[in-house]
Image (spheres, coloured by chain):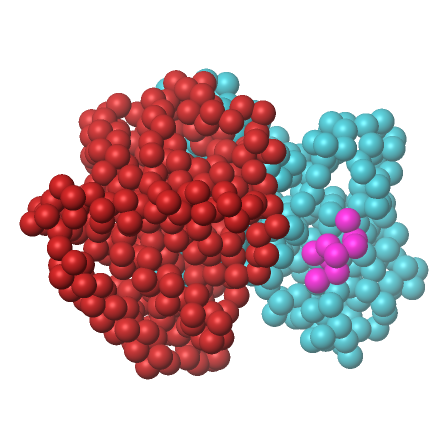
Chain colours: A red, B cyan
Amino acid sequence: MSDSHDLDLLRQMLRIRRFEERCAQLYQAEKIRGFLHLYIGEEGVAVGVIGSLLPDDAVVATYREHGHALARGMDPGAVMAEMYGKMEGCSRGRGGSMHLFDASRRFYGGNAIVGGGLPLAVGLALADRLRDQPRVTAVFFGEGAVAEGEFHESMNLAALWNLPVLFCCENNLYAMGTALERSESQTRLTLKAASYEVPAWEVDGMDVLAVEDAARKAIESVRSGGGPHFLEMRTFRFRAHSMFDPELYRSKEEVEVWKERDPIELFTRRLITDGGLTEDDLATMESDVAEEIEAAVAFAEAGTWEPVEELTRFVYSEVVPS
Amino acid sequence: MTSLATPTRTITYREAMRESMSDAMRNDPRVFLMGEDVGRYGGCYAVSKGMLEEFGPDRVRDTPLSEAAFVGAGIGAALAGLRPIVEVMTVNFSLLALDQIVNTAALYSHMSGGQFNVPIVIRMTTGAGRQLGAQHSHSLEVWYAHVPGLKVVTPATVEDARWMLPTALEDPDPVIIFEHAALYNSEGDLPEQGAPVDLDRAVVRRPGPDVGLITYGGSLPKTLAAATELAEEGISAQVLDLRSLRPLDTEAILTTAASTHRIVIVDEGWKTAGISAEIAASIAEGAIWELDAPIRRVCSVEVPIPYARHMEDAALPQTAGIVAAARELVGR
């Protein structure tokens, strides 16, 4: 029998995968609208990194953040209800798929401007630094963000001020439809980090244990005053960029080759071979996950619509009379 | 207004702003200042001169020339519970931080269903008039005033320079303070015993029944000068200082329109889609039957602000133009 930690890693990846597969169906059924960006294929990254954080650390994610939200422990029902646009959603239905928030878990979104979350992460870390709190801020972004000025400005500032930021680059090779080599003169992303004197490691993002190992080491160093670190997680998104993407920019063969390195299948096989995971264990896990997701869907279905009268609430903070 | 019984002292707008920041930092350990050249250099406009020595480099932080990163970092620090004052050297450079201000600071409260608020104060210089050329002479306050979720204030007096900031720091939401560069050397009498002022009400700086002159920020001195000239001709003008562009004190604007029946709007921004257009529309919606004459706007000519003195003067609102517009409205 595999150890419980390995099983938990597998379970976390599986629940993200099944949750998003259900989201895709619900999109076809027009229960979910707007943009829907699936993380399928990249689950090992969020699970490996976020599972290595402490509850008081902070997470800043992108618009492809369902996996990060679930890995951070957000309630799948609240996330699903958000996608439905229901008031019981984690952002009250104002955010949708791209803007999941949870203050209680220090989950700061859900930022849908490429590169926009990086300065924010630097500021969260600056606050910790100024208050002497040994906390880490993990910020996720795709390789596309590396072309943004905000990436370079944020790396420089975090390094200059020695701030506790873990820069997590999810290199899935395509910024929407633009391949890395079509957008970067230097495609070795760790060299960019190195130019700011930031320790940077390349990590196999399809291997959850490799991600976890790198994340643990980096987080430990960041937390103990070692300044920002940069992880380039090499991964691949198996599905289209969004529900509107006909995928003209990459071949089916390329996708199939990467699918052979499916992080969930790889890890499952490993646990069967090395850890004694049985088909029965797996079936039980699948059924538990399915049950959790159906409960989330039921929660979203049963949710309510925020009254239109509340439209103008929260543009500014509501002052609670003391 | 200062009553005769209150002891006052003469102070510059720059000193008032510095005193305000220093005072806030002494009173609240959550407050810190960051921006380009705020520390060792003492601030591009010398507003923070001496503050590094008192508060140290952790609380008076020099930043690289990275407007997006340090404004965004201020937003992050505010989200985490601190009270940053972020100085962006000028509104011209703030365009490099538009994403962080508009897409993050302004949206996080509403977009998160009220879970987050961003108690940041962003200060920046605005305006023209010193032959700095087109790229250093913008008046783009209205760009920010357009966005729900932001508050935009424009202190024009030493009292507002001294006492708007503590209110802004108490505010749970992002407040942008626009300081017109021409005001830094202006002097005024500040009551010794001051107190924080509100951020959302316009103030009548000079009463008068004949014509209403509505303005804010760096145009206030020019407008008050125009009112003085008009008084010499027997025209008693009311001068309304907006003080805040978001929220806009529509009630005060309508009251001025209803009591003077003739309105001149003075704004260093351009007319097209400017705050002057918003003010005029508010009057058209709420007080059009009160008007005895068409609304007049004295704004910058719709050109990039030129370098040569005579050309720059011609591009900007001037006292003579305000006087002429008011005269025309009262039929003189």
**Name of the residue lying farthest toward the right:** B332
Q: Does residue A320 appear left or right of residue B190 in this picture?
A: left
Question: In the image, is residue A40 above or below residue B46?
Answer: below
Residue at figure coordinates x 59%, y 41% from the top left: A178
Is residue B179 visible to the viewer in this orientation of the structure? no
Q: Please tell me how many numbered marks the rendered image carries.
A: 0
Report the magenta residues as a range.
B270-278
Q: Nearer the viewer, residue B8 or B318?
A: B318
Residue at figure coordinates x 74%, y 27% from the top left: B132
Location of the C terminus of chain B by quadrant is bottom right
Q: Nearer the viewer, residue A91 or A282?
A: A282
Residue B275 among those drawn in magenta: yes
Q: Nearer the viewer, residue A38 or A320?
A: A38
Residue B167 among those drawn in magenta: no
Q: Does residue B110 appear left or right of residue B94 in this picture?
A: left
Question: In the image, is residue A10 above or below residue B26?
Answer: below
Q: Does residue B214 appear left or right of residue B192 in this picture?
A: right
Q: Nearer the viewer, residue A26 or A296?
A: A26
Is residue A80 visible to the viewer in this orientation of the structure? yes
Q: Position of residue B58 (x, y in %)?
A: 33, 26
